[in-house]
Image (cartoon, rainbow, N blue to C red):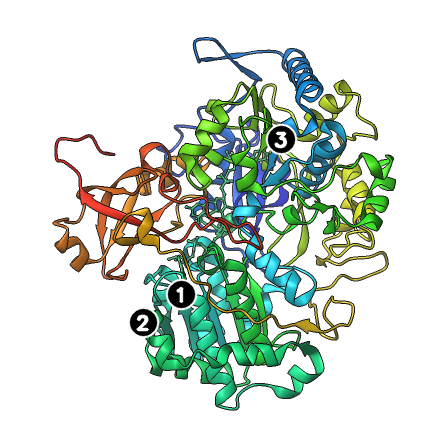
Amino acid sequence: MTESHDSHCPYCALQCAMTLTPTDASSGTPPIDIAAPAGARRLPLTVAGRDFPTNRGGLCKKGWTSAELLDVDDRVTSPLVRQPDGSFAPASWETVLDRIADTVRDSRDRFGADSVGVFGGGGLTNEKAYQLGKFARIALGTSRIDYNGRFCMSSAAAAGNRAFGLDRGLPFPVEDLDGASTILMLGSNVAATMPPFIGHLQGARGDRGLIVVDPRRSETAKLTDEGQGVHLAPAPGTDLIVLLGLTHIVITEGLADLDYLAARTTGFDAVRRSANAWWPERVQQVTGVPVAQLREVSRRLADGRGTYILTGRGVEQHVDGTDTATAAINLALVLGLVGKPGSGYGTLTGQGNGQGGREHGQKSDQLPGYRMITDPAARAHVAGVWGVDPSIIPGPGVPAVALLDELGRPGGIRCLFVHGSNVVVSAPDVDAVRAGLRALDLLVVSDFVLSETARLADIVLPVTQWAEEEGTMTSLEGRVIRRRRAIEAPGEARSELWIMRELAERLGAPGTWSTEPAEVFDELARASAGGKADYSGLSHALLDTGIAAHWPFPPGSEGTPRMFGERFAHPDGLARMVAVSPRVREPLGQHGGELTLVTGRLLEHYQSGAQTRRVPELLGARPHVTAQLHPSTAARLGIAEGDAIEVANVRGLVRARAEVTTGIRLDTVFLPFHFAGEQCANLLTERAVDPISSMPEFKRTLVTVTRADATQEVPA
Ligand SMILES: Nc1nc2c(c(=O)[nH]1)N[C@H]1C(S)=C(S)[C@@H](COP(=O)(O)OP(=O)(O)OC[C@H]3O[C@@H](n4cnc5c(=O)[nH]c(N)nc54)[C@H](O)[C@@H]3O)O[C@H]1N2
Ligand SMILES: Nc1nc2c(c(=O)[nH]1)N[C@H]1C(S)=C(S)[C@@H](COP(=O)(O)OP(=O)(O)OC[C@H]3O[C@@H](n4cnc5c(=O)[nH]c(N)nc54)[C@H](O)[C@@H]3O)O[C@H]1N2
Ligand code: SF4
Ligand SMILES: [Mo]
């Protein structure tokens, strides 16, 4: 019998539980390869859904087909070095590690340590994310580290920190939603992005109803057809005004929980004044959401039978994303929902380790345990764990978009390490990013596939992936879970802990550099002790007993599944209500175009598509980019279903096929961002960022849509 291993899905933050069984040739275990004819290809393991609170045994299409990732055609199995003719040739680890260390040393000597940069990812295990932050600060000596979570969770995190003094995406277990009577979901399409999550919406769907706010009739918005559901479809980017309008109605109709506000919050007066200006008729005029719907939704939220407010990227990935998330938090506080059993506010974290990835030091301004790098006490504590003098830890660096902007510029970054992101597809304004990467002296990409970013590298380092490695992830509910090795990695693939150790040694770095995930976890736990995200009572051994470990988890604790029951994390224990109001936006018209482009996700593809475009069943279902257009808009532009079209603005041009649907507003066009080359939605997005979180404006830009010349080449 081949041994089975309990682990979790390689993709999103729901971290659905799986059992992985190696298809050992002698065991007779049948191979699964859904796309290929039976027996055509034998995958290294089989995947089965496992019972767990978040997924209850269910998996989505991506989870079911995840074993395909282990055996993709262009799996990188040895270090690759770019040749003068542009091709890659395999090389030995010794050669490439020596060359990297030499180039980094030279760059530091000539241009200073900040000429070396690191770009991390929210898919890395806690151990790797922690080690990457330490590697940047004390092996490379650079302040220039940030990661793709800046594109993902930064606005909600900033709003949570500001309001509650702490950011844990869901401050309650996912199962708590089962008992809800009303759930307001703003800018989240869980039906496509976390399908098993829908199981937790049953109560709200069957009872008072699910309320979905999305300019599109997304798969999740369609769920509101049942029972008492409501779909609000405001103009993209106007959610802050919708939320101020709902807050206005709650206050003027006497539905606010004044006792709660007095006992648990500060700042209500200013919030009340800011909401005053947004009476329902004015909100309708700006957002397009009818007054009657606004009133109906306000009353339902206040019915006191168990209400949750949840936000997703649709409201967060804007230049005012932090303020919009703050407005959602203010509404939840006005209703007295936060920290009370059976109600609450949360943001739905996206990447597999999107939660842990933002706690252990990959962020430009942060040290492990969710500590600030500018705080002298934090620096002293972490320096103690690292065995270095606090003065050698650099100060804050710059956030992702600014970091990418420094690539190849005079006085900027000349060598870049990328771990777990495919920036030439997923960052805003990708043409500019590509130019920056090309201008580097050295680009080192660690990946297990030749992603579009890896293809631009000078050196590609082959790394282990989910089913080949041990570690921990922290799911969207702040629960620390174990990832387990089920099979050996192919060829010369190595763990990133090993790569960092080898480079740290070559660079003469201080401190110790373990390659054992359990040891690195113990060090991470010590570094986090006393911080906001405190893991100090946890270890791999304790997690292996199967406990439900929601942080903070200091020694002797049983974890913290529910937060804020008694107090918030600010020193006075009160939640801060921050008055927010819509800023005057620069007229988007200046950037050319007549339709608003909204970007987002499809069920079948994950992020930049680097992984899922390599899985035959997923690519087969969604082989190329399609742009959603309303039938009236399509007719006006002379476009029919399936036509080749061009979506363009001053930054670039995307070639797509038209998908004509009544599920989108007349003024809006939708593109998923999972495709590369001339199908890449981020050719069109801009580098404008939220001033508080540095989140780019991914969700809203202006474009022109035209039918492509029939003779032009378009995606098949
Ligand atoms: N299949 C799949 N699942 C994934 C991922 C994936 O790439 N593919 N990625 C994972 C990650 S990292 C993340 S962050 C999550 C993201 O999960 P979601 O937040 O659910 O994903 P998105 O599709 O980006 O955005 C959600 C919705 O926001 C809407 N939207 C756009 N603009 C606006 C607006 O101005 N206002 C409002 N109210 N809504 C708007 C879009 O129409 C879309 O339906 O998904 C995770 N799960
Ligand atoms: N227009 C638009 N753009 C967006 C968004 C949007 O909604 N609209 N959403 C944004 C969001 S929320 C996110 S999270 C980003 C995500 O976008 P990316 O940061 O590009 O994320 P992935 O596509 O997951 O890229 C991960 C890469 O790392 C590799 N990888 C996976 N695991 C590991 C590992 O453990 N180690 C190493 N070294 N490599 C690994 C994968 O093979 C893949 O090549 O995109 C953002 N971009
Ligand atoms: S919902 Fe997320 S974690 Fe669950 S199987 Fe799908 S991709 Fe994996
Ligand atoms: Mo994300």
User: Can you tell me whether the CB of the residue at mark 1 lies under 8 Å from the nearest atom of ligand 1?
Assistant: yes
Q: What's the residue type where badge 3 is placed? A: Gly
CA separation in Å, label 3 and label 1? 36 Å
CA separation in Å, label 2 and label 3? 44 Å
Pointer 2 residue: 288
Q: Position of residue 36 (x, y in %)?
A: 36, 33
Q: Position of residue 348 (x, y in %)?
A: 54, 59
Q: Are marks 3 and 1 in contact (CB under 8 Å)?
A: no
- Position of 173 with respect to 677 (left or right) is right
Mark before the other along the chain sequence, 2 or 1 = 1
Q: Measuring 39% from the left and 63% from the top, which residue is drawn there?
A: 220
Q: What's the residue type where badge 1 is placed? A: Thr
User: Which quarter of the rendering shows the C terminus?
Assistant: top left
Q: Is residue 698 visible?
A: yes
Q: Are marks 2 and 1 in contact (CB under 8 Å)?
A: yes
Residue 117 numbered tag? 3
